[in-house]
Image (tube, rainbow, N blue to C red):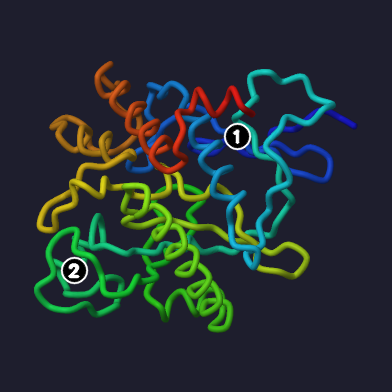
Amino acid sequence: MPGPQLIHQGKVRDVYSHGEHLLLVATDRLSAFDVVLPDPIPDKGITLTQLSRFWFQRLPKEVNSHIVSFDVPADLSRPEWVNRITVCRRAQPIPLECVVRGYLAGSGWVDYQKTGTVQGITLPHGLLESSLLTDPIFTPTTKAQAGHDQPLTEAEASALVGPDLYFQLRELSIAIYCWAHAYALEHGILIADTKLEFGWIDGKITLIDELLTPDSSRFWPKDQYQPGRSQPSFDKQFVRDYLSSLKDWNRQPPGPRLPPDIIQGTRDKYLEAFRRLTGTDLDTELNEL
């Protein structure tokens, strides 16, 4: 069998073709505002992979996933990939980023302040920033190969993938969010929102990519939650807030260098999310794998 072939380098992950499978290798790169920053976050790729592993191994049985294993294939000598790799089945991606929001934050809050809606979904009057929504809402976006993903209304997303598939993706995404939110709530974290991706494998809708990580979700500490303000978080919002404070960066490449305290603070937040959700420190978890 020939060695793995690099077929795509994303903002965070490198994707290789290897026989009948794909290899997703999570790096320590960090992107914010769709720009890859010049300074990596130590152990970030390992944290993302192992947290995805945690969730994928606990998925409800009715949810199909692309996972084959999290081990470096036996025919490859790539020690640098240990604990960073996801071996997965090939899928035909569905061209929709499936975003579920349980709280009013981020671009949803900005949209609501202007229109009283989030991507065309009317919400009650008088909600505050970070308010808990009565029911989670499905707010998909495009899957841009370059640049920014664009928010879609229900009509636009239905036109893109078809009404039947749109309905299935919405119901499945909300179900996964509610399952994860209930688990995280018991472990001191509020999952404010998350992004899921799906594809087709053997004619079935299948969950692909990463799952419920600090890169794809907003994680808030339950004991500090207070509507009416932005929340402390265990995700890259910490970096976004720092970058937003800069007066001389226009959110275009190249990204600015990160100070050591921002790098360390980001690492600590990712590790704290892992610890709270899994109940173990990352180093302890890796020693047991």
Task: Give above or below for 190 relative to 167.
Answer: above
* Label 1: which secondary element: strand
Residues packed near mark 2 inside 10 Å, few (<14), some (14 to 19) or many (20 plus): many
Q: In the shown orientation, is residue 103 left or right of residue 227?
A: right
Q: Amino acid at mark 2?
A: Tyr
Please tell me the numbered disc located at residue 112: 2
Disc number for residue 60: none
Residue 194 rendering spot, x and y as whole percentages? 40, 56
Give x and y (percent) for residue 206: 65, 62
Q: Which residue appears at 36% of the width and 26% of the height?
A: 267
Q: Earlier in the sequence, mark 2 or mark 1?
A: 1
Element assignment for label 2? helix
Q: Nearer the viewer, residue 188 or 121?
A: 188
Query: Where is the C terminus found, in terms of image quarters?
Result: top right
Percent of width and height locating residue 56: 59, 50
Kindly identify the amino acid type of the residue bearing the numbered disc 1. Asp
* Quadrant (top left, top right, bottom left, bottom right) of the N terminus: top right
Image coordinates of residue 58 in percent, x first then y, are: 58, 53
Q: Which residue is mark 1?
A: 14
